[in-house]
Image (spheres, grey):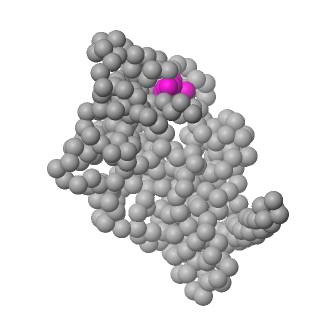
């Protein structure tokens, strides 16, 4: 018991020290941002680290959000997945919500998928995420084609996540290419329309802003950075550091998704690899900043400011910074385990409980 108390006290001391360092460094960034104009480069795309944003006037504007839900389960000889994705379109007139549209429906029927390929546990997890992203991205593209919103927010990144590049010739690689094609089609649709494509990541674990900031510190402020400052950057996630840097209604400078997109394992799959930009914005006073990615085919600074102003107008809860259109999509896309159970029992009734559909031992242990 004594060891646990000592470990807890030691951990608390380390955490408090790191948080104090981040707080101190965040205030330093606020001070230098107001006094210094940065030199622009491939990595530094704006002159200020911190940019204040005004709420948008929501008049004669359509704002869409897309999210998906998934439940899955492995059996002795196959895997079952249920998928659902929905597009929500908020239409505003005179700063008031005038109508809400849903695509394909207000509560879409889940799409069942039976996976017969003999994937191992990791491959099944990756394949499930691939199928979910294909569903969401296809729904996003179709929502844009039908409603042409001014901006569409994905709940998450605008490029594929939770995957690796499978070996060519494998069943997983075939599905991976289907996913890449789905994203590419979405980018093509966006390029031909007025819609701005953006993604909002609630709990980002990213460190890309800290990487850019490290370069800024070395080239603009202190070539011989103090070890304490460098350690703060190395040990911080972007959102954690920026929580002490940004005030409500401010965003960070914009930066490219990757320093070297041609070598990035996922970005290099796309011809638009250099057009994915990011920033962080504090949309709620009592919540941490959220990461925003967007497709910047032209006018990237204007797009970043427009997206930011829309987000401020859509984020109405002081303690929760996610925009309302994504919250609505999330609530309607959710699936529960009982949805999969209904699908499973329906299959059992039609097949007579074959060996392939026996549950795995780990799920039916008697003790």
Q: Residue at x 25, y 33 (%)?
A: 116
Q: Residue at x 19, y 53 (%)?
A: 168
**Left or right, 47 with reference to 157:** right
**Left or right, 317 with reference to 299:** right
Q: Quadrant of residue 239?
A: bottom right
| Location of residue 179 in the rendering, given as x and y in whole percent from the top left corner | 29, 42
| Location of residue 79 in the rendering, given as x and y in whole percent from the top left corner | 34, 32
Q: Is residue 339 magenta?
A: no
Q: Residue at x 34, y 25 (%)?
A: 357
Q: Quadrant of residue 98?
A: top right
Tally the marks.
0
**Left or right, 248 with reference to 45:** right
Report if residue 145 is visible in the image: no
Q: Quadrant of residue 97?
A: top right
Image quarter of the N terminus: bottom right
| Location of residue 37 in the rendering, given as x and y in whole percent from the top left corner | 58, 72
Q: From the viewer's perspective, is residue 65 above or below residue 28?
A: above
| Location of residue 196 in the rendering, given as x and y in whole percent from the top left corner | 41, 42
Report if residue 262 is visible in the image: yes
Which residue is situated farthest in the left direction here?
A: 169
Q: From the viewer's perspective, is residue 8 above or below residue 173?
A: below
Q: From the viewer's perspective, is residue 276 above or below residue 30?
A: above
Image quarter of the C terminus: top right
Q: Nearer the viewer, residue 144 or 234?
A: 234
Task: Specify the segment rendered in magenta.
Answer: 331-337
Q: Nearer the viewer, residue 26 or 10?
A: 10
């Amino acid at each position: 018991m004594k060891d646990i108390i000592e470990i807890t006290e030691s951990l608390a001391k380390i955490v408090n020290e790191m948080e104090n360092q981040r707080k101190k460094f965040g205030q330093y960034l606020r001070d230098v941002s107001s006094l210094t104009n940065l030199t622009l480069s491939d990595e530094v795309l704006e002159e200020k680290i911190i940019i204040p944003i005004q709420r948008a006037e929501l008049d004669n504007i359509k704002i869409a959000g897309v999210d998906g839900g998934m439940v899955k389960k492995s059996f002795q000889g196959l895997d079952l997945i249920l998928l659902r994705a929905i597009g929500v379109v908020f239409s505003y007139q005179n700063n008031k919500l005038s109508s809400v549209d849903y695509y394909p429906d207000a509560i879409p029927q889940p799409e069942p998928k039976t996976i017969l390929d003999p994937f191992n546990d990791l491959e099944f997890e990756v394949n499930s995420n691939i199928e979910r992203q294909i569903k969401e991205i296809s729904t996003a593209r179709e929502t844009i084609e039908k409603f042409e919103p001014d901006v569409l927010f994905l709940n998450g990144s605008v490029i594929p996540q939770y995957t690796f590049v499978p070996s060519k010739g494998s069943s997983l690689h075939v599905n991976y290419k289907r996913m890449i094609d789905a994203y590419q089609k979405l980018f093509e649709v966006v390029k031909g329309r007025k819609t701005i494509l953006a993604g909002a990541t609630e709990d980002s674990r990213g460190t890309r802003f800290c990487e850019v900031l490290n370069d800024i510190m070395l080239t603009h402020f202190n070539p011989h950075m103090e070890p304490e400052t460098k350690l703060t950057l190395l040990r911080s996630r972007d959102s954690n550091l920026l929580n002490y840097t940004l005030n409500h209604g401010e965003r960070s400078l914009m930066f490219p998704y990757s320093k070297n997109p041609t070598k990035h394992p996922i970005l290099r799959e796309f011809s638009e690899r250099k057009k994915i930009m990011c920033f962080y914005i504090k949309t709620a006073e009592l919540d941490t900043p959220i990461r925003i990615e967007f497709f910047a085919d032209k006018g990237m600074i204007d797009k970043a400011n427009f997206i930011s102003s829309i987000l401020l107008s859509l984020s109405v809860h002081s303690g929760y910074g996610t925009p309302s259109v994504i919250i609505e999509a999330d609530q309607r896309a959710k699936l529960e385990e009982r949805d999969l159970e209904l699908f499973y029992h329906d299959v059992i009734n039609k097949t007579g409980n074959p060996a392939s559909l026996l549950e795995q031992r780990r799920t039916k242990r008697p003790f």
